[in-house]
Amino acid sequence: MEFEERLAALATKVQNQREAIQTEEATKNAFVMPFISTILGYDVFNPLEVVPEFTADVGVKRGEKVDYAIMRDGEVQILIECKKSAEPLKVEHASQLFRYFSVTNARIAVLTNGEVYNFYTDLDAPNKMDDKPFLVLDLGDIDETLLAELQKLSKENFDLDSVISAAEELKYVGAIKRALGGQLREPSDEFVKFLTTKVYEGSYTQKIREQFNPLVAKAIKQFLNEQVNDRLKTALGSSFIGSSQMEAPATVVESEAAVEENLESDTGIVTTQEELDGYQIVKAIACSEVKPYRVAHRDSKSYFAILLDDNNRKPIARLWFNGKKQKYLGLFDENKVETKQPLDNLEDIYGFAAEIRATVGRYEGQANG
């Protein structure tokens, strides 16, 4: 199983089980140990690789423990401190990490609740752990741009120097992305004022602030929708180049106009977390054939479509999860004829990895032929 597939499987497990996890110990057993073993590749039962309840004398804090220490060549490389699942992570939770960071050889410290993993190093001052993480991995919303750096901390690909050299850029780019995402979801007064003063020449009074607050929120929403629509139109347009010179294949059910009409009229759609989890699994499987960003999704009232290049003519799979009982995975043959496969759980999707990869491979072969 590829790195992305293992990560997607763990993310699905976390989403499905987190409500049942009520203690820190349960979090470690259910989520953190699998992360160390299946994602980072270290043997959690080998004390030469992973030391649980790692202890070192730290000033007057003798006998204090860190949940896990990952070892390489007899030296501590990564320290991991755990909090219980669903508990928001705060830097105050990392007191042991701060103390241990200065007295061990570790250059990487991790604070996690099993779903979010905050990675720290010592960019601001040597041998002193930074207050802010340089990498944040959220299994509920995986940022695929971080996966290459995460792999460098695995046993197989360990490259600490490369991680440290990229840490400063990762730290600030990640922080900016999270700050921007927060502003787009809920604009602050400062952000509203910044944009208002760009378009309004009068004084920025309380009355103007109240007037522009909803306008800024509306403009942001419209802007994001337009960006998505532009991308969709580009994908649709590129797939229909030359269509006037050739007859469309009989197996293509929907025309460009029909697709756009459906997208316009398909209201009342509710995208569930289970559908998104299934999409992540299919995407992880397809990533052995194409880059992750090329695997897109569109939801409808009947099914959840997973497409290559966001192109309706390149269906990879469909998730038929809207029924009350049985769930199905729709797969496509070389003629784009769909066959529904029953699923008992999301993990069953991995059993159809060969079919999913074959479908993506056919589209790539057609494009290169």
Image (cartoon, rainbow, N blue to C red):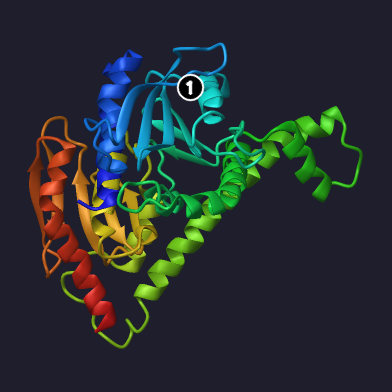
- Front residue of 81 and 215: 81
Q: Please determine whether, in this image, residue 250 is positioned above or below residue 29.
A: below
**Residue 252 vertical placement versus 210 (above, below):** below
Please tell me in which quadrant of the rendered image residue 37 appears. Answer: top left
Q: Looking at the image, which residue sits at the far right? A: 203
Q: Is residue 150 visible?
A: yes
Q: How many marks?
A: 1
Q: Compared to 290, does 50 lie above or below?
A: above
Q: Position of residue 161 (x, y in %)?
A: 50, 53
Answer with left or right where residue 20 lies relative to residue 210: left
Residue found 52% across the figure and 51% down from its top: 225
Residue receiving disc 1 = 88
Comparing 297 with 289, the one in front is 289
Residue at (11%, 52%) from the top-left corner? 352
Disc 1 marks a residue whose amino acid type is: Pro
Tell me the quadrant of the picture where the C terminus can be found.
bottom left
Which SS class for mark 1?
Answer: loop
Where residue 328 sits, quadrant-wise, is: top left
Mark 1 surroundings within 10 Å by alpha-carbon count, few (fewer than 14), some (14 through 19), many (20 or more):
few
Of 122 and 185, nearer the camera is 122
Name which residue lies at 55% across and 48% down: 167
Judging depth in this view, the residue of 190 and 64 nearest the camera is 64
Q: Who's the residue at 19% across and 76% down the image?
A: 249
